[in-house]
Image (tube, rainbow, N blue to C red):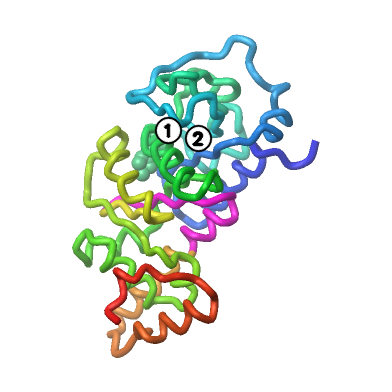
Amino acid sequence: MGETAIDRFARMCYDGFLQGWHERNGGNLSYRMDENEMKEVSALFSTEPRHMDLPMTFEDLADECFIVTGSGRYMRNIPLAPEKNMGIIRIDGTGSGYSILWGLEDGAKPTSELPTHLLNHQVRSKATGGRCRVVYHAHPANITALTYTIAPDARTLSRILWQSETECAVVFPDGVGMVDWMVPGGTEIAKATAMQMDRYSAVVWAFHGIFGTGSDFDETFGLVHTIEKAAEIYLKAKGAGIVRTITDEELQELAKAFNVRLNRDFLNV
Ligand code: 13P
Ligand code: ZN
């Protein structure tokens, strides 16, 4: 057997840890599996899967299978003991509960942010014609620090990021969403996040971290990496004193050269 979806998932968790984005149990990851990926690992599945209820109904995700990280589990431990720190769940036909097919051993539960992950999958899958498969939550220091310096506003945040690194407008031409501080781990923050995920591939949580989405692990990790790097550059430049930046005209030239459509609401021209 070559590299399975479980292996690729575990590698991304560890890559995030190496970046310093996953202190303690911070951050979580989910991946919507396809049929072939399910077949590759089906020999591992439990014959008596544990069943759990969901706090809300996810009708559009009925019968979908996800790899998820465990609540309270550390990203740095995932490659060492995947069966204890992550698992595969199958959403019921009604979308109101799930079965644990593999992993999450010793009574572990999926991440406390499961409502946000599932709602984001539901919304992003629709927004991307089914392409979106990965939802990733991380606690990178620079993007989190940046949220202390601005109002919780997607336009302000997106303009800062676009101006801070030339790649940004090409990588996320729609911009990045932003949710003001809320208690994490429930259905309220899930709904507030998903309300923006129809427009943006990533949403920042004030004073907490970021949710990024994408069609595969590389795209999703790369998106969060790009946003975090831009935030780092912005904070460094701000500390040194910003005297000029990429202009809106230059952003438009960039969009033309790379054949992307920038979110016009976020431009001043
Ligand atoms: P979990 O350990 O439940 O995944 O929570 C970590 C986290 O980052 C909450 O926002
Ligand atoms: Zn978090």
At label 1, which amino acid type do we have?
Thr
Q: Name the residue under label 2.
A: 69
Q: What element carries label 1?
A: loop
Residue at the extreme left: 151
At label 2, which amino acid type do we have?
Thr
Please report the residue visible at 43 percent of the width from the left and 23 percent of the height from the top: 95
Q: Mark 1 points at which residue?
A: 111
Query: Does mark 2 have its CB less than 8 Å from ligand 1?
Result: yes
- 1 and 2 marks in contact (CB < 8 Å): yes
Query: Does mark 1 have its CB less than 8 Å from ligand 1?
Result: yes
Picture quadrant of residue 232: bottom left
Q: Is residue 168 visible?
A: no
Q: What element carries label 2?
A: strand
Ligand 2 quadrant in view: top left
Q: Percent x, y for residue 22? A: 45, 48
Picture quadrant of residue 110: top left
Q: Can residue 208 be seen in this view?
A: yes
Quarter of the image for the N terminus: give it.
top right
Please report the residue visible at 66 percent of the width from the left and 39 percent of the height from the top: 5
Find the magenta span and give its range: 207-225
| Distance of label 1 from label 2 (alpha carbons) | 6 Å
Please report the residue visible at 64 percent of the width from the left and 11 percent of the height from the top: 47
